[in-house]
Image (cartoon, rainbow, N blue to C red):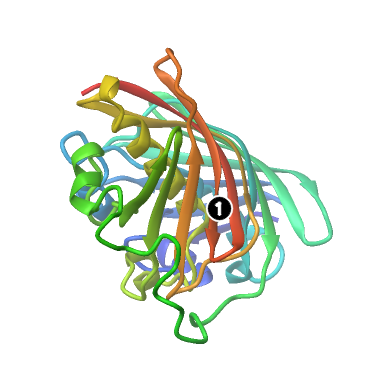
Amino acid sequence: MSESLQVNQIAARLGLKAPWKLLDFARKEDETHFTGFKNFSANEAFFAGHFPVHPIVPGVLQVEAIRQLCCCFLPGDARGKRIKQLDKVKFRRPILPGDRMVVEAEVTGTAEDSWTMKAVTRTVSGVCSEASITICNAPEVVGGISDIPALDGQFARTADINMDTDRVMGLIPHRFPFLLLDYVAKVEGEKIIAVKNITGNEPFIEAGFNTVPDSLLCEIAAQSGCTSVLARPENAGKLGFFMAIDKAVFHRQVLVGEQMVIEIDLPAGKSRFGKGSGFIRVGDEVVAEIALMFAIVDA
């Protein structure tokens, strides 16, 4: 049976507010095929921080739009679902202010508590992204940390960190509200160790998420990787564009008050495409593992 949802119905079902309303319309074609639509305006808040001179829709927000579409129509509570795994996500062409995006998703597999979907986003120019996404049931987390953490961890923000926020912003073009690194603690050869604090004032928390959106963990990893590569002398003045997520596995949700340590290995190469892999952890616990690819181009 088909079902259609308008923007406020979608937002109510997902429990989300602006600026994370990433669908203006959604329709269940049948039990395994879902279609969504989104108008992108130059007034979208994320454009101010994602390549501000030449704004483009972040690829991970296309992934989030896919998640939102699927969660609206998969069985059970839409708020009690999260991304378990991403495979072969490819960002093929940019989505720009003024573009109109269609999202198409198909259920290709089911398990006891999860669904695997094949999805694409497209505009009038053609396919913009494609992905295999596994969504699982997960209890809704409310609240944050339960005690005051130690402040003197191995990668605490001390005077001898490798890069502060200003230095990071000198290498990548991302700005608020889409700058997702606080500092780089260390660079050890081809490995970067970066840090991101999660606070109750995060825009996504204000928009209705109780934890860090899984899709955003991929952007955090990508910004860490690009910072590392663009800090190398041969890449001075260049830009990094997120091209693909080969695989991402999300083990648990990240809470308000937690500090994420991002460790990404990026072997040097002669190609303009960089590949890296690594993980995000909170304390000693790995919360996500990510393998990604990006392109280094002249500014």
Q: Residue furthest left?
A: 53
Report the quarter where the C terminus lies.
top left
Label 1 environment density (alpha carbons within 10 Å; few <14, some 14–19, many ≥20): many
Residue 119 rendering spot, x and y as whole percentages = 60, 39
Residue 26 rendering spot, x and y as whole percentages = 51, 53
Name the image quarter holding residue 208.
bottom left
Q: Residue furthest top?
A: 270
Q: Residue furthest bottom?
A: 147
Residue at the spot 39% in from the left edge and 47% down from the top edge: 38
Name above or below for residue 254 compared with residue 50: below
Name above or below for residue 254 compared with residue 130: below
Name above or below for residue 167 compared with residue 189: below
Q: How many marks?
A: 1
Residue 14 rendering spot, x and y as whole percentages = 51, 68
Residue at the spot 70% in from the left edge and 69% down from the top edge: 76
Q: Nearer the viewer, residue 150 or 143?
A: 150
Residue at the spot 53% in from the left edge and 48% down from the top edge: 66
Residue at the spot 24% in from the left edge and 53% down from the top edge: 164
Q: Nearer the viewer, residue 19 or 155?
A: 155
